[in-house]
């Protein structure tokens, strides 16, 4: 037997491969600072855990509605309406096990062979993987460091064709930490409003931002709500990665399609997890605020440290918890740098090309780790930097 041809078009997340290598080094007795995985290093807030325990005690251990528990969908609709400045009802909400199904299912439902999908590059690798798996044509949109890792709008306009079926946006963004400015979103909305095209707006980092104003959602611009799929969830904001719970807000025709795909794959999202989700959105938010404040402190420290390393240049990210360092001045390939840091310095990070061709020359560091570990990582990199720094380099 051979696997179906479509399996040759599906990719993986390299972060987990790098984690395996790092764990193998640790098994040999070597010390490794883990800055490869994008996962908050905080505990799920206690009131959310208690809500899950209570739900288990109350018997929320059986199948639930495929679209999600009505109470949770009502809470999500209120939350999204309030935070995005739009009006949506619970009938437009789909609750799924994690954020990825809101990438996978809409792409399966919308994309046919020959359809083009514009997506950010460097970007979350599952975008391109799912586009190819569905038979679509990936059209990478380079994110430019000089624009705060946002799009060149003229290039974006040029890449729109009659075959463009879907646009993927991600703000705040993985791996760059970039935030798409409101004015850019307004221009993008103007280009798309009268086109037969949908937008998948990945807003999973919507609460982890460092500016005065929260990141804008393209769904909030005139004429865009009915063309937008909002992806959000609980993993990043509430440190609930292992709970596997995300959601999408989308037009009704896509809700029906996602529900069909859920029935055929997962049946439903765990009922007790959904009860905890209600507590997350309606309960106290002080722990989220403290987590984001700590991420800001770490961001400032790691970017300052990286900018002191010969050959490194790192802009301050506007959101998420990733530092995307430009390493072109080291004279080494970004994959060589990432491997060198792992095996020679004991610092596990990711080559920017893990996120697409336009990630070449960059290395991603997740600062979802303690301040002492981040400072230790910087010191380790500094110690080995003379092995690549040009003679006489001054920064």
Image: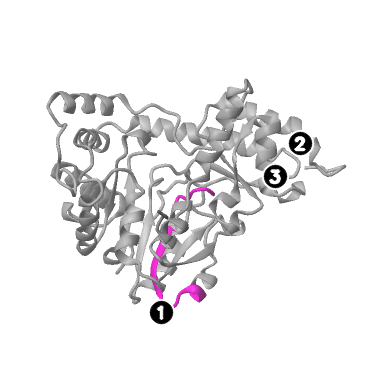
| Residue 220 shows in the view | no
Image quarter (top left, top right, bottom left or bottom right) of the C terminus:
top right
Magenta stretch contains residue 228: no
Q: Which residues are magenta?
A: 157-176
First of labels 2, 1 by sequence position: 1
Local secondary structure at mark 3:
helix
- Residue occupied by mark 2: 385
Left or right? Give the position of 94 relative to 238. Answer: left
Q: CA distance from mark 3 to mark 1?
A: 40 Å
Q: Which residue is depicted at the point 52% across and 41% down?
A: 15
Extreme residue toward the top, this view: 29
In this figure, which residue is indicated by the disc labeled 3? 336
Calculate the distance from the C-alpha at mark 2 to the C-alpha at mark 1: 49 Å
Count neighbours of disc 1 (C-alpha within 10 A) and say few if under 14, some if 14 to 19, many if 20 or more: few
The residue under the point 20% across, 34% down is 275
| Magenta segment includes 160 | yes
Note whether residue 188 is visible: yes
Residue mark closest to the camera, 3 vs 2:
3
Check whether the beta carbons of the residues at disc 3 and disc 1 lie within 8 A of each other. Answer: no
Residue occupied by mark 1: 162
Q: Residue furthest right?
A: 392
């Amino acid at each position: 037997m051979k696997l179906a041809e479509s399996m040759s078009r599906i990719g993986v997340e390299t972060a987990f491969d790098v984690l395996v290598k790092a764990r193998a080094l640790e098994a040999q007795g070597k010390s490794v600072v883990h800055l490869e995985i994008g996962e908050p290093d905080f505990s799920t807030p206690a009131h959310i855990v208690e809500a899950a325990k209570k739900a288990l005690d109350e018997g929320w251990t059986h199948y639930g509605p495929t679209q999600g528990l009505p109470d949770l969908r009502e809470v999500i609709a209120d939350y999204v309406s309030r935070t995005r400045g739009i009006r949506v009802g619970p009938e437009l909400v789909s609750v799924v096990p994690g954020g990825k199904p809101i990438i996978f299912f809409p792409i399966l439902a919308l994309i046919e062979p020959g359809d083009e999908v514009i997506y950010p590059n460097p970007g979350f690798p599952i975008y391109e993987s799912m586009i190819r798996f569905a038979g679509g044509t990936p059209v990478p949109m380079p994110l430019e460091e000089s624009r705060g890792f946002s799009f060149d709008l003229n290039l974006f306009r040029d890449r729109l064709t009659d075959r463009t079926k879907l646009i993927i946006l991600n703000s705040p963004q993985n791996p760059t930490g970039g935030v798409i400015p409101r004015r850019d979103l307004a221009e993008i909305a103007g280009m798309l409003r009268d086109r037969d095209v949908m937008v998948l707006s990945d807003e999973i980092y919507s609460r982890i931002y460092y500016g005065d104003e929260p990141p804008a959602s393209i769904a909030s611009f005139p004429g865009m709500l009915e063309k937008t799929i909002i992806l959000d969830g609980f993993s990043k904001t509430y440190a609930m990665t292992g709970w596997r719970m995300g959601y999408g807000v989308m037009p009704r025709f896509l809700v029906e399609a996602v529900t069909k795909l859920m029935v055929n794959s997962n049946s439903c999202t765990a009922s007790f997890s959904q009860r905890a989700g209600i507590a997350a959105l309606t309960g106290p938010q002080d722990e989220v605020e403290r987590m984001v404040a700590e991420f800001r402190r770490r961001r400032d420290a790691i970017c300052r440290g990286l900018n002191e390393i010969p050959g490194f240049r790192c802009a301050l990210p506007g959101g998420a918890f990733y530092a995307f360092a430009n390493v072109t001045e080291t004279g080494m390939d970004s994959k060589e740098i990432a491997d060198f840091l792992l095996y020679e310095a004991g610092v596990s990070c990711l080559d920017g090309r893990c996120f697409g061709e336009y990630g070449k020359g960059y290395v991603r560091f997740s600062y979802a780790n303690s301040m002492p570990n981040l400072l230790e990582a910087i010191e380790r990199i500094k110690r080995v930097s003379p092995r690549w720094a040009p003679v006489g380099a001054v920064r």
